[in-house]
Amino acid sequence: MEFRKMTACRAAEAVNNGETTACQLIKEILERCNVLNGKLNTFIKIAGPEALEQAAAVDKQVKSGQKLPLAGVPVAVKDDLCCRDLPTSFGSPAFKNFISPYGAAAVEKLTDAGAVVIGKTNLDDMGIGSTTTSSPAGPALNPWAPDRVAGSAGAAAVAAAQCLIFLESDSGGALRQGASHCGVIGLRPTMGRVSRYGLHTFASSFGQIGITASSTDDILAALEVISGFDARDASTALYREKSAEKNAAVEPEIIKIGYPTAIIALLAPDHRNLMERAREDIEASGFQLTDFKLDLLAEALRAYYIIAFAETSSNLSRFDGIRFGMADYAENLDELYYKSRRLTFGQEASRRSIFGTFILSQGNYDRYYRQALKIWTLVRREFTAVLDQCDLLLMPAVRTLPQLVTEQIDFCRLYEEDLFCAPVSLAGLPSLCLPVGEVDQLPVGLQLVGRPFSEEMLIGAASRIIPEIKFPPNVIC
Amino acid sequence: MEYEVVIGLEVHVELLTKSKLFCCCPNRFVAEPNINTCPGCLGFPGVLPQLNSEAVRHALTASLALNCEIALYSYFDRKNYFYPDIPKGYQLSQFFVPIGSKGFLIIEDDNGKPKTVRIGRVHMEEDAGKLVHAISGNTSLVDYNRAGVPLIEIVTEPDLRSPGESRRYLEQLKGILQYTRVSDCKMEEGSLRCDANVSLRPMGCPDLGSKTELKNMNSFKAVEKSLEHEIKRQRDILRSGKEVITQTLRWDEGSQATIVMRGKLQAHDYRCFTDPELAPIELTEEDVEKARAALPEMADVRAARYVNEYDLPEYDAGVLTSSHGLADYFESCLELYNNPKVTSNWIIGEFTAQLNSTGLEPDQCSFQPKDLVELLLMIDQKLISGKIAKDVLAKAFQRGTSPRLVVEEEGLLQISDQSELEKVIVKVISENPDSVENYRGGKAKSLGFLVGQVMKETEGKANPRLVNELLLKIIGS
């Protein structure tokens, strides 16, 4: 099999009509995956025996005449999504041996559709961050430039064809920035479209499960499988109500895409040029273009972080050493908390917990948290107003190229990287990151942002814009 | 100086629901620890809360029964603090917007006059687990069976002015919550818990004095006693010119005294913020009106109806309506048997005696209304005497069989056969010539003795009225 040009849809077709078997497919990709992992460090765990067992079950179903939409498709899962019977580390040494007794809803829907989980991918400590530099396993490397980080290990895995579909969380932009850095397509759906049951998220208001793949068809196929109401996630009730508003086929002529002339000025020249070229390409594809501006981006970024810090301090409280987290001998309860949380939390998790605790404390709640909530409302309004004028918004996804592995970057500067992604999370809108070109021979993507539950339109539009997906030239395999 | 007592009560009540507040675990007491638990109520990462709508209905019912205004839009907030009995590191509670507010209850004050006690708020929250401290050694264990059990907290304004008023408030509250079947309110089992805030102020002073908080009172009597104790303590302090220290005290049943629990009333900073994982609770006017219409008749209304409709003495009406179950039992009997006073006598007397000795509730015992009615009909039909009926009731209750079966098995049918009774009477007369003489000599009492002898001979089965009649006829002739 030539995985470099393989799509998930094509693979499923081949398995369904007997050209190959899931076992064959999985066996081959596991070999490839293992070899490349030595170079890229994308996987924390490659679940060979388990994947082959799953593949055999898929083959059995196919043999019995069933057509599975993702038959035999090798899928990778970020390690903050729980998989039944596979360890889930959350990127923390404290969870080295944690095997959850439940599987994430989205993962189980994928496997029910015939997909095979081949492993869990690398991530930042407690899933916090979009560089993987704080991972206990060391950073995942970019297949385009191994001296740089991938941002998202799974995006790198998709780019290097270690898997065909990757399921991961996105809060402030990890999924979208990873897709941009690795030259693949990443979709962050609207909150409520996909059940988050089984996703450990540090910020419940923003943590959402998305899909990364190398073709829009694959994104759509996976989205159809994983979306829908789930009683175990209250947010999915929204989608059930609104599911009737599905978008019809995408005709460029009737779609108005907003272009953020004012925002472009914030970009470095290379990135600005890329954005302008993309504008021309989009116009050439027949879409209508119109100008839009967002005045609250900087405020939105700060509001996002304030709320995310607050939620982090609360969401991570359960790792107190009593049931979870590394327990240590202690003379009394306070000492137990102190010791075990010190051992369990990495630097960023500690930092955000402390910030969040401060933000929510008496007096500070009004000063910071309540203000952030107000900005949240204003940002939502601003996006809604803009999306009254346009169907889709074109926005940058990243400000810079992926950092060098050796680079030490101040945490505030890392937060600033989320300037274009975090506000979209705050607004609760769906966003798709698509590759549009290169800067210094490294891929760069842009975001298409839509109205709530307009994922089909995003995917449809992206399919008309995306040039041929390039394969990283350095990956020889 | 004369002081005015100011008391406010905080009552926690466990709701009678099938499952816990945010997961599907059963809400019922089991002795074995950590049996009623799941990843949800154990705070496993990635599991989201699912709100139990039955609990919301109960909270709504209770709020309406307590004359509260209903918040059509409310939600749950996180109260963040560390303690091993809260698995998530926070307790979900309606901190900002309670479902019910501005309610009231009317009680009797110490002079027997009606008095309004304002209820500030009724809100839902989840219960914590239980810590079990090892008798020897320095370990503590946690039992999470109770974690996530739905509670409502009912908080009064500082309107109570004496321990007696406080007790009457609690009794009234308990009656209402039992009547509406919101809770079983068993204080000894912890399904009703009460904390009291108490302070003294000079008569006529509008400002509140420094208060203390009383905890660990396991019965209404204990509440009354601990308040009396605390009021005396505070009064002594004030009279000696010192100041009352704001602190939390624990009532010690053994020594019948309050003991300081926490040196100072710790101003806990719970860092509350609205839970981002649950959807808000949205009620419609229609929901509220439906719940209002479904409110059962309250005890006082019901008692008044018994007096008016059934001509029962107030005492009977009061006792029968003191528990929902007993009143329901009474009314079920009346559907089959139209003699309210006789029914009431038997329920208040023998039936209640059996309930008390077995500790069962009316709907838990096998002696159902149809059984009591069967018994009463047998008395009416002169098949058994009232005296024997008492015995039959006890046996039927304890054996779980019908009264008729007891009567048949034990051969207790009343002898109403005239010729059979005449034989016995003749025998008794011949054996007691003195009594016969005494009677004829004017001692009416002697007749009673002779009746007694006949009853004895027949093992109580003779129809006493018939015996009387026949004796008079025979002696008189």
Image (cartoon, coloured by chain):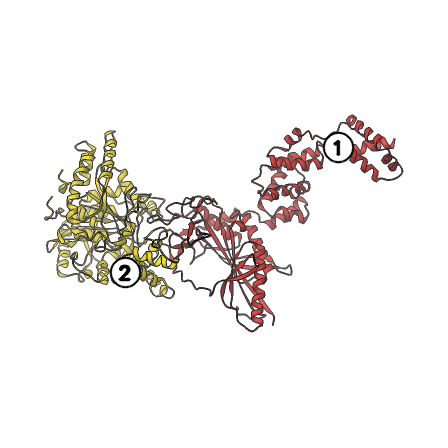
Chain colours: A yellow, B red
Q: Determine whether B369 is above or below A123 in the image.
A: above
Q: Residues within 10 Å of mark 2 (few under 14, many from 20)?
A: many
- Viewer-proximal residue, A424 or B222? B222
Q: Determine whether B438 is above or below B21 in the image.
A: above
Q: Quadrant of the C terminus of chain A?
A: top left
Q: Residue beneath label 2, please?
A: A300
Residue A391 can be seen in this image:
no
Q: Quadrant of the N terminus of chain A?
A: top left
The image quadrant that residue A228 belongs to is top left
Q: Measuring 15% from the left and 42% from the top, which residue is drawn there?
A: A32
Q: Helix, strand, or loop for circle 1? A: loop
Q: Which residue type does callout 2 highlight?
A: Ala
Q: In this rendering, would A206 be left or right of A417?
A: right
How many angstroms separate mark 1 from mark 2 (CA)? 92 Å
Task: Provide the chain ID for the residue under circle 1.
Answer: B
Q: Nearer the viewer, mark 1 or mark 2?
A: 1
Residue A310 can be seen in this image:
yes
**Where's residue A207, x and y in %?**
29, 52
The image quadrant that residue B367 belongs to is top right
Q: In this rendering, would B141 be left or right of B166?
A: left
**Where's residue A196, x and y in %?**
31, 47
Q: Helix, strand, or loop for circle 2? A: helix
Q: Residue beneath label 1, please?
A: B463
